[in-house]
Amino acid sequence: MPPPPLALIPPDVDVVEVRGTPTGDQLAGAEVLYVWDHRFADLAPVLRSADRLRWVHAASVGVNRLICPELAQHQITLTNSRGVFDISIAEWVLAAVLSFVKGLPDTLALQREHTWLYRTTGRLAGKRAAVVGTGSIGRAIADRLSRLDVHVTLVGRHESSDLTAVAAEVDILIAAVPLTAATTGLIDAEVLAALGPAGFVVNVGRGATVVEDELIEALRAGTIAGAALDVFEVEPLPAYSPLWAMPNVLVSPHMSGDYVGFEADMMGVFVDNLQRWLRGEKLHNIVDPDSGYVRG
Amino acid sequence: MPPPPLALIPPDVDVVEVRGTPTGDQLAGAEVLYVWDHRFADLAPVLRSADRLRWVHAASVGVNRLICPELAQHQITLTNSRGVFDISIAEWVLAAVLSFVKGLPDTLALQREHTWLYRTTGRLAGKRAAVVGTGSIGRAIADRLSRLDVHVTLVGRHESSDLTAVAAEVDILIAAVPLTAATTGLIDAEVLAALGPAGFVVNVGRGATVVEDELIEALRAGTIAGAALDVFEVEPLPAYSPLWAMPNVLVSPHMSGDYVGFEADMMGVFVDNLQRWLRGEKLHNIVDPDSGYVRG
């Protein structure tokens, strides 16, 4: 993560910049905690020791590492940065899917060998895709795929209980869900088998939504055709992972949403909420700690 | 080129299958010549020796190799396969442009080294593109870019006389023009300098529309940021071309339009025209031999 553009915070707000886990001194008197690093996973002890803390804002959309019982116990509001990444992630999904359909990784591999090898490739228009996740990112992905004449099924909480049936009807399966108990391991060997040998998987949510071992096995066996992954069970993806060397896989280092200038836009979401806070108004993007995402 | 699906031609039509340049015996009595291989360049002597030939149909959209004075001299109609490649080429352009904007070639290169390197990349929405060529392919490209919120300028014959001024206003310059006297060398050092160091060039028309040496120099010098090329001055691209090894270039072997199943669709365009011919009706997709493409 690049450093947060703190200069965007109004000058009358007292800011303590923290690197790593905040100490008791740093937290003393703090009412608001802005978690810039989406990998931060020590919120529970912070909430137990910070007696004046009322609001935690996450510079991310996925907040699975921040959800803990202490939020409700201490009546602390959690908000996220919903909306910042919608277009950039949707475009990254289009890039990954079109690159797959048009065989660009093969074209690049042949180019490295100075080999002119004519092939025919596919067309995206008319294909069928399922987007698992009906948050603002999932909807942006579905919208942009539809604009390119893909037949899109948007899969919410209720439909995801029968994801195998959905996968059997589509060519492309895209995961854009928060990591919750209900979405952990959602895409497994059975779903991949239903997707079939021409199927393509994209994950831009959280790694553990896909059972990674079963995905690797399906890619090896040709149960599915390929995958584009921006998130993994363990990040950074360990050097020993077979995913790195698979020719039908795109390994992307959790960057699908991060466009040049996103830091300022992300800080803008926080500052907008901070001004609401200072005026005593209701905050935007309040995460429901039970479901793990912003509702409605 | 794969073999043509001749079985789609009505059985009452007498078909002589020719490999390479047709002989006098093969041409004897032929009224219609279907040129399947877009690299065929020996039409003039064929027209001089085939006394009954009235119509030549090209299984391609670009017909620059077929244009010759003999067409008018012998009152022979030339038609092309306009329309078959519109969507597939437009999608290939989207794939190439999105892959560039999202840095997928770098992601793939880092993946080969098992290197997790977080970066920020760009967004396509809001960028400006110029599409040179107002035929059905150019219009399909412009349409699809517009659907992704790119600001598109469509550049026709009149505007292309000041392409430098157009290039100065855009981020992406896409060539989708037939090769004619007016379009040969259209994109040169001056146009590339106007496009500028963040600029990206795409060519899906004919190689000689771009002055290849000047493009190579601009890519080397950083005058522009990158290029995606499906066509080249000489095809196959010679092994000695520096384009192969340039990290900011996609070298694609003249396949942007060729999707799985295009052969049957291409033959369908011919058979539709053949049935018009047999009924004595006006043909579709008649190429104006003076301009080198289908007018209007």
Image (cartoon, coloured by chain):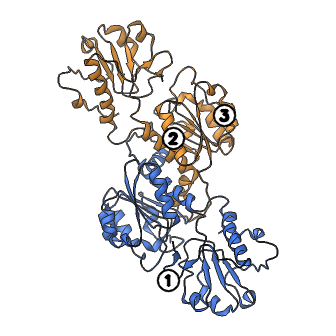
Chain colours: A orange, B blue
> Please, what secondary structure does the residue beneath circle 2 have?
helix
Question: Secondary structure under badge 3?
Answer: helix
Q: Nearer the viewer, residue A113 or B294?
A: B294
Q: Residue at point 45% right, 14% down?
A: A68
**Picture disc at residue B290:** 1
- Residue A143 disc label: 2
Q: Spatial distance from mark 2 to mark 1, Cα to Cα?
A: 44 Å
Q: Nearer the viewer, residue A109 or A75?
A: A75
Foreground mark, 3 or 2?
2
Depicted A233 relative to depicted A119: above or below: above
Callout 3, which amino acid? Answer: Val
**Relative vertical location of residue A41 with respect to residue B252 in this rendering, above or below:** above
Distance between the alpha carbons at the discs numbered 3 and 2: 18 Å
Q: Are marks 3 and 2 on the same chain?
A: yes
The chain to which mark 2 is attached is A
Q: Are marks 2 and 1 on the same chain?
A: no
Do the dots labelled 3 and 1 sit on one chain? no
Q: Amino acid at mark 2?
A: Asp
Mark 1, chain letter? B
Which of the 4 quarters of the picture holds residue A27?
top left
Q: Is residue A237 visible?
A: no
Q: Of callouts 3 and 2, which one flags the residue occurring earlier in the amino acid sequence?
A: 2
Pointer 3 with pointer 1, Cβ within 8 A: no
Q: Label 3: how many residues lie within 10 Å, few (<14), some (14-19) or many (20+)?
A: many
Q: Please determine whether, in this image, residue A139 is positioned above or below residue B156.
A: above
Please, what secondary structure does the residue beneath circle 1 have? loop
Q: Position of residue A141 (x, y in %)?
A: 50, 39
Q: Is residue B192 above or below residue A251?
A: below
